[in-house]
Image: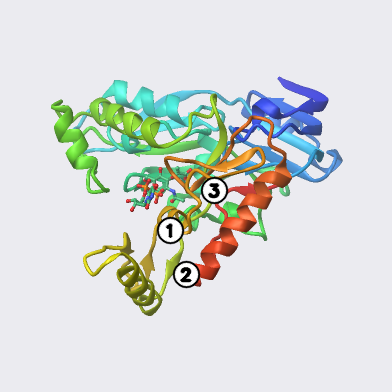
Amino acid sequence: MIKTSYYQDLTKMNTFGMKVKARCFMEYDSVADLVDIEFEELARPVLHIGGGSNLLFTDDFKGTVLHSRIDFIEILEDCQQISSPVLVSVGAGVVFDDFCAWAAKEGLWGVENLSYIPGEVGASAVQNIGAYGVEVKDVIHTVYCYDTVEEEFVKFDVSECGYGYRDSIFKSPEIKGRYIVTHVVFALSRVPMPKLEYGHLKDAVESSGNELTPSNIRNVIIRIRKEKLPEPSVMGSAGSFFKNPVISQEHFARIEAAAKAEHGADYKVPHYDLPDGTVKVPAAWMIEQCGWKGRRSGGAAVYEKQPLVIVNYTGEAYPEEIIGLEKRVTSSVKEKFGVDLHPEVEHI
Ligand code: EPU
């Protein structure tokens, strides 16, 4: 079934809580419905949203917003041999964390570190969501889509999706909006494969005293996320507002020398050396060093526990206030570190 409404309030459909409307809003609940939609005739532009957890609406939306309610989780292949992957097909409209909860309950490994990330399965495959040392591409097997240009169903093997850090071919300017994800097949595992190398995750899991199961790791991850990140139902945000920048080793050496001069010779700048010789530096650290942690600007604020997140502090923030704060943070980081921050959140 396709449900269409006009001048639809989107406040509850974007986790930032921007009070905007869409000229046309269409929600469909089956793959077959997509064939019935006359894409050529939709009010333009067309935007397909998931949980609206990675978007900043900067104004009312003049075109059509589409939303999938394709909602199933189905085991395709499970030959019960411990070493074989368990292929699970999941509808694009399933809340990603509902899938993580289901996998944990089934005792399947692969998505436990991605627990409690807001958003839906379709968007997870577009954005290549990631947390605690795992990216969703690590467990994606195939992405099934509807091609709105050729009006046919197509599938992409994970190797064809062009996955990078929070990136995929589905985000590339040439084909953005062309393919609508209908469902994703994940390859999960019955073989224990805990990934605990990120930060203090291992300590946190060990100190919980529980055995290593997807369910117990999921609980630890949820606890960490709740401690650090704002609960979308309590305070609007879109999770990380910025990507973590990647810089050259020379540039990092200059930043490190300046930090040591400022904080003392023993000071350690958090960073991750990447295989290609470049260095990823947490944007959170740079923003904090610029003094933004917890600072408010009108209805917007830099979140006090994780400065990578910009929040709708009052619940009444205008898009302009969020964007104003974004610009001020970006220019301070540029001035102090010579680093360009790029938003992770998509501005609509
Ligand atoms: N840090 C600070 N000050 C702070 C917080 C963090 O200096 O107040 C530094 C610390 O050195 C810390 C480092 O930043 O070790 C990294 O912090 P964290 O582990 O919280 O991760 P992040 O790099 O800031 C990324 C993702 C998050 C994901 C976490 C955990 C991006 C843009 N963000 O954040 O994803 O949950 O790792 O894996 O890559 C999201 O995408 O919406 C999101 C929340």
Please tell me how crowded label 3 is: few (under 14), some (14-19), or many (20+) other residues with Cα within 10 Å.
many
User: Which numbered disc, 2 or 3, marks the residue that appears first in the sequence?
Assistant: 3
Scheme of colours in the image: rainbow
Decide which of tag 1 and tag 3 comes sooner along the chain.
Answer: 3
| Residue plotted at (59% across, 32% down) | 15
Q: What residue is drawn where x is 40% and y is 76%?
A: 251
Mark 1, mark 3: which one is toward the viewer? Answer: 1
Q: Residue at x 27, y 25 (%)?
A: 215
How far apart are the two marked residues, 1 and 2, measured between alpha carbons? 10 Å
Label 2: state its secondary structure.
helix
Residue type at the position of mark 3: Phe
Residue tagged 2: 337
218 left or right, relative to 243: left
Whether the residues at callouts 1 and 2 have beta carbons within 8 Å, the answer is: yes
Amino acid type indicated by mark 2: Phe
Q: Residue at x 70, y 28 (%)?
A: 11
Residue that mark 3 sits on:
241
The circle on residue 165 is: none
Q: Quadrant of residue 101 in the image?
A: top left
Badge 1 marks a residue whose secondary structure is helix
Q: Nearer the viewer, mark 2 or mark 3?
A: 2
Q: Is residue 169 left or right of residue 74?
A: right
Residue linked to disc 1: 289
Q: Is residue 61 above or below residue 339?
A: above
Q: Quadrant of the N terminus?
A: top right
